[in-house]
Amino acid sequence: MKRIGVLVSGGGSNLQAIIDAIKEDRLQAEIGVVISNKAGVYALERAEQNGIPTVVIDHKSFNSVVEFSQAILECLKRYQVDLVCLAGFLRILDRVVIDAYPNRILNIHPALLPAFGGKGMYGHHVHEAVIASGTKYTGATVHIVTPETDVGPIITQGIVGVADDDTPESIAAKVLKVEHQIYPEAIRLLLEDQVVIDGLRVIAKK
Ligand code: GAR
């Protein structure tokens, strides 16, 4: 059974979507550990309720991103994970982690990358930028994590419309629903080795 490590910073609704997909047999895997950079977040409670080991690695107790990332890497190795899923994890990871799991770290982003990504583009900032831009569509993207933020190969995307009366909060709610559908499916595609990664393109195997 493949083991997933999930990195979180907040509410953990995407973590819950992964837990539910495993319970419902839509995903053949187990979550080996949930790591949060913040104590007390609801994602940790969701993990505990499901008997999943939790670890808090507080970025504030390290002098640099490299040291923080090394601590994360040691933890992932200790729990012997095969795949790492960033699920609302709002810290940047150094390449010490990225190099240790080539094409094996996924992130979910609340917009249609390559638009509305990059440094500072997370949570409500993304949805505010979407409204300000006047775009009629937004959505969610699952992509492979590379050293540059939000530009790795895209595994899957889901689309939602932007209505005239939408607010950052209403868009966030619509986008989250889509995230919960596409994240477990993207994990399955990768774990079942159903895709080929060719540069920035992720192509379904025939
Ligand atoms: C999700 O919308 C996720 O896409 C976003 O944070 C939220 C976490 O929700 N991530 C980013 O903005 C990363 N750049 P959750 O804790 O309920 O899964």
Image (spheres, rainbow, N blue to C red):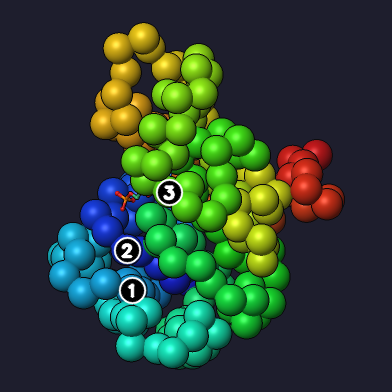
Question: What is the spatial separation of the Cα atoms under label 3 and label 1, in whole angstroms?
Answer: 16 Å
Dot in front, 3 or 1: 3
Q: Read off the residue under disc 1.
A: 37
Above or below, 55 against 93 in this view is below
Q: Nearer the viewer, residue 104 or 61?
A: 61
The furthest residue to the top: 164
Label 2 Cα neighbours within 10 Å, binned few <14 / some 14-19 / many ≥20:
many
User: In the image as oriented, which residue stretches furthest toward the front?
Assistant: 132
Whether tag 1 and tag 2 are in contact, CB under 8 A, the answer is yes
In the rendered image, the quadrant that contains the C terminus is top right
Q: Is mark 2 within 8 Å of ligand 1?
A: yes
Give residue 9's mark.
2
Mark 1 CB near ligand 1 (8 Å cut): no
Position of 18 with respect to 158 (left or right) is: left
Residue with the mark numbered 3:
122
Ligand 1 within 8 A of label 3's CB?
A: yes
Mark 3 crowd level (few <14, some 14–19, many ≥20, 10 Å Cα): some
* Residue contact between numbered discs 3 and 1, judged by CB atoms under 8 Å: no
